[in-house]
Amino acid sequence: MTSAERARGQPCPIDGVPRGFDPGTAVAPADGASHVSERVDSCLVVGGGIIAARAIASLLEAGTRITVVSPWLAPALLEVAREGRLSWWPREYARGDVSGFARVVAATDDAVVNARVLAEARERGLPVTAAGDAPIAADRR
């Protein structure tokens, strides 16, 4: 059983909306990184809740092409995905997901996951931000 299958039907810790997704509403392939071509305006956002929504709003205003990896999306983000303004990989973050992106944002409520995302992005020399934090000077490009 996948983590998304385990989480399906459980209340979201942020807004009470059931976790998981309806396969009919998925807006991007679940296998993720193999379908991404690197662009200077592409960003991977890890997380699908309110923390991520704040970061995504700014990125959308800047015209950034956004992919979100998260087992669930907050209702506002799900609507943005349905409008085609972001791609969604409905699963948990996995090592290698940052490949092919120009920038990465760690925006989960799990410090361990955020640390893994930050470490992998830095290993690959990618600019990376933990949502809610200002980018570290060394991470800016």
Image (spheres, rainbow, N blue to C red):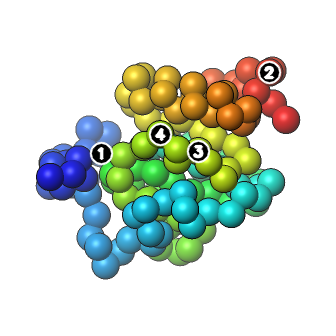
Q: Tell me the distance, in whole angstroms, between the alpha carbons under discs 2 and 4.
A: 22 Å
Q: Tell me the distance, in whole angstroms, between the alpha carbons under discs 3 and 1.
A: 27 Å
Q: Position of residue 75 (x, y in %)?
A: 38, 58
Left or right of 93? Residue 101 is right
Instruction: Give the foreground label among 3 and 2.
Output: 3
- 3 or 1: tag closer to the N-terminus: 1
- 4 or 1: tag closer to the N-terminus: 1
Q: Tell me the distance, in whole angstroms, between the alpha carbons under discs 3 and 4.
A: 8 Å
Q: How many marks?
A: 4
Q: Residue at x 28, y 64 (%)?
A: 21
Q: Tell me the distance, in whole angstroms, between the alpha carbons under discs 3 and 2.
A: 18 Å
Instruction: Give the foreground label among 2 and 4.
Output: 4
In which quadrant is the C terminus drawn? top right
Left or right of 10? Residue 49 is right
Q: Residue at x 26, y 57 (%)?
A: 20
Left or right of 67? Residue 93 is left
Instruction: Give the foreground label among 1 and 2.
Output: 2
Q: Residues within 10 Å of mark 3 (few under 14, many from 20)?
A: many
Is 48 drawn above or below residue 32 in the view shown?
Answer: above
Q: Which mark is residue 98?
A: 3
Residue type pointed to by label 4:
Arg
Q: Are dots 1 and 2 in contact, CB under 8 Å?
A: no
Residue type pointed to by label 1:
Asp
Q: Position of residue 115 (x, y in %)?
A: 49, 23
> In the orientation shown, which residue stands out farthest toward the bottom?
24
Element on which disc 2 rests: helix
